[in-house]
Amino acid sequence: MVFAEGSSAPVARLWQVATDWSGHGRFFPLTTVQVDSSATGVGQRLHATTRLGPLHLDDPMVVTRWSPPGERGCVELTKLGRVLGGRARLDVEPVGSGSRLRWTTDVGPAPARLRRATAPLSRLAAIPLYRHVVRAIAREAEHG
């Protein structure tokens, strides 16, 4: 699935907001993100936790591609969890006098065969969530 949103913010600002991993809790409901390693870039580990009362979902991931913007930027994350698997890719590129965030994801239940089998159901939850996330990141880059 691919989600995109334009912003009046420059590429560097949109990149900054999109890759502020510990701040992603502002965009993903009920979620906190801890950065497990101080090194930025490939190999950086993140751990997202989504909580609803006593229930929680752990979502460890690692940065597998890191190309900060000159004109455009790209980062890829690989999910490492037992419950969620897949990849996410964030591209930031110039558009007119602003920029655009494109978020491509194939995240879903692990392992991959289960992810493929549940894709139609996963899409029902993912579409409104990622639309919200991408839009919120773009708006924060403009106003934050």
Image (cartoon, helix red, strand yellow):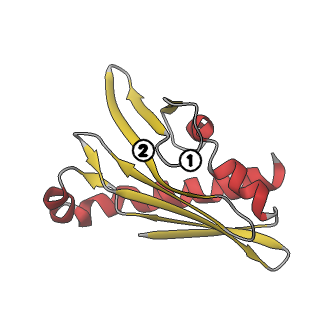
* Near-viewer residue (75 or 6): 75
Image label count: 2
The dot on residue 41 is 1
Give the quadrant of the C terminus.
Answer: top right
Picture coordinates of residue 99 (x, y %)? 74, 69
* Near-viewer residue (116 or 124): 116
Residue furthest right as drawn: 97
Classify residue 47 as left or right of residue 58: right
Residue visible at 25% across and 67% down in the picture? 120
* Near-viewer residue (65 or 18): 65
Residue furthest top as drawn: 54
Relative to 72, say whether 15 is above or below: above
Picture coordinates of residue 41 (x, y %)? 56, 47
Classify residue 135 as left or right of residue 56: right
Relative to 32, say whether 87 is above or below: below
**What's the residue type where badge 1 is placed?**
Gly
Residue furthest bottom as drawn: 96
Q: Do the residues labelled 2 and 1 touch (CB within 8 Å)?
A: no
Identify the mark nearer the N-term, 2 or 1. Answer: 1
Residue picked out by circle 2: 62
Instruction: Classify 10 Å Cα crowding around label 1: few (below 14), some (14-19), many (20 and above).
Output: some
Residue visible at 59% across and 42% down in the picture? 40
Relative to 70, say whether 18 is above or below: above
Instruction: Classify 10 Å Cα crowding around label 2: few (below 14), some (14-19), many (20 and above).
Output: many
Picture coordinates of residue 135 (x, y %)? 63, 59
Helix, strand or loop status at disc 2 = strand
Relative to 45, say whether 90 is above or below: below
Residue visible at 24% across and 64% down in the picture? 119
